[in-house]
Image (spheres, rainbow, N blue to C red):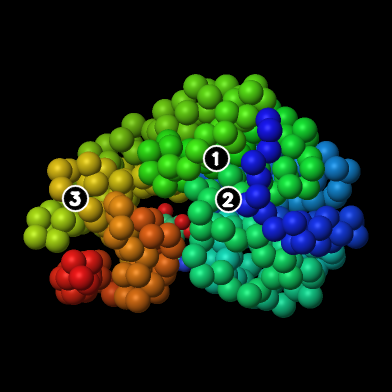
Amino acid sequence: MNTLCNRIDKELINEAEILLKESKQISIIPHSGPDGDAIGSSLALLQYLKKKGQDAQIISPSAYPLFLRWLPENSDVWIYTNMKKKAEEYINASDLLFIVDHNSFKRSGDLEKVLERASVKKIMIDHHPEPEPIVDLMFSDTKMCSTCELMYEFIEALGDENLIDDKISECLYTGIITDTGGLSYNSSQPRTYQIVGSLIANGIDKSKIHSNIYDNFSPDRMKLLGHCLDQGLEVLNEYNTAIIKLTKEDLLKFNYKDGDTEGFVNYPLSIQGMQISVIFIEKEDMVKISFRSKGNVPINLVAREHFSGGGHVNAAGGRSLDKLEVAIENFKKVIPDFYKSLQQ
Ligand code: 5GP
Ligand code: MN
């Protein structure tokens, strides 16, 4: 593929090359509760580094959903919570850490303190807003649809595009489609499709990947979705906003497994006129909140200012320590002013 890549700073890539050459042991850290982009970009990087003859290990702060466990080299991922001592030893003995698909140690979950303390060189590869200065080298670009897109650019800028084989391509393609709702949002740049084109040219089975990701749910998950939309939907027409919710009892009733609620928050956005959709999920120790919006509606501001979270303009997350109904009421109190600020 002819390269149009001027998205990566040359000096930065030279420094990364030097760091990589100097490193014998490398840890790759996705964010806590990794999604398709976090795990896809980590697995792509792992395979790339191994092809370069380097000793590398992915250490995920926590487990990730079943629908991602088919990815190439998935069995090589260490889950920190299952092997804390070994993982900490590996991290502390590393020469280099990659912080992938997140930009603050707060998003590293149980690894937060371990990473903070680790006196190891660090490189960030990420596409979220407001990166924190926690690394030696920062590859951070919110214009990328996904960290996987940036990872492609990173490997290409290192002059190693030819090492991106079908397996690495599968991982990168997975992150690109899971972060864009199957290339439906946040994916309007031609370059994304050039990259997708080259991944397809590398021999990925696109239909198989879509099927693995989107047709891999349990009957219980389907019923939970039905229940959630049937019982939990509230439409605030005045604010083009839809709210859905799940209680602890709902989760129990439908045998909730990690990842089952992934994507639920997107459904209300297909109601005519909706610009904002929010899901409140009651967990053991907090209410987990996911926010989605369309177009120029920076819903990450609401997540950041009112719900101890953050994220992208159109996709953000946060939490509340209040009871489920109180958290929802608090959101309803906030939304009129936020909505008004959009009209200005
Ligand atoms: P989700 O709703 O799928 O959990 O997250 C949507 C987006 O918001 C993801 O890109 C994720 O990285 C970001 N996000 C989720 N929770 C948090 C949070 O607590 N803090 C920040 N800064 N970002 C979050
Ligand atoms: Mn991402």
Q: Dot 1: within a 10 Å radius of its alpha carbon, few (fewer than 14), some, or many (20 or more) residues?
A: some
Image-quarter location of ligand 1: bottom left
Secondary-structure class at tag 2 = helix
1 left or right of 311 in image: right
Along the line of sight, the residue nearer the viewer: 232 or 266: 266
Give the quadrant of the N terminus: top right
Which mark is first along the chain, 2 or 1?
A: 2
Amino acid carrying label 3: it is Met
Calculate the distance from the C-alpha at mark 3 to the C-alpha at mark 2: 28 Å
Q: Residue at x 80, y 51 (%)?
A: 56
Q: Which mark is residue 191?
A: 1
Q: Identify whether 162 is placed above or below 100.
A: above
For the residue marked with disc 2, what is the amino acid? Thr
Residue corresponding to mark 3: 274
Q: Residue 109 bears which disc, if any?
A: none
Residue 321 in the figure: left or right of residue 117: left
| Residue 174 position in % (x across, y down) | 54, 37
Q: For numbered disc 1, what is the local secondary structure?
A: helix
Residue depicted at x 75% and y 57%: 10
- Residue 75 position, x and y percent, is 68, 40
What residue is at 70 percent from the left and 58 percent from the top?
Answer: 9
Q: Quadrant of residue 254?
A: top left
User: What is the quadrant of the C terminus in the image?
Assistant: bottom left
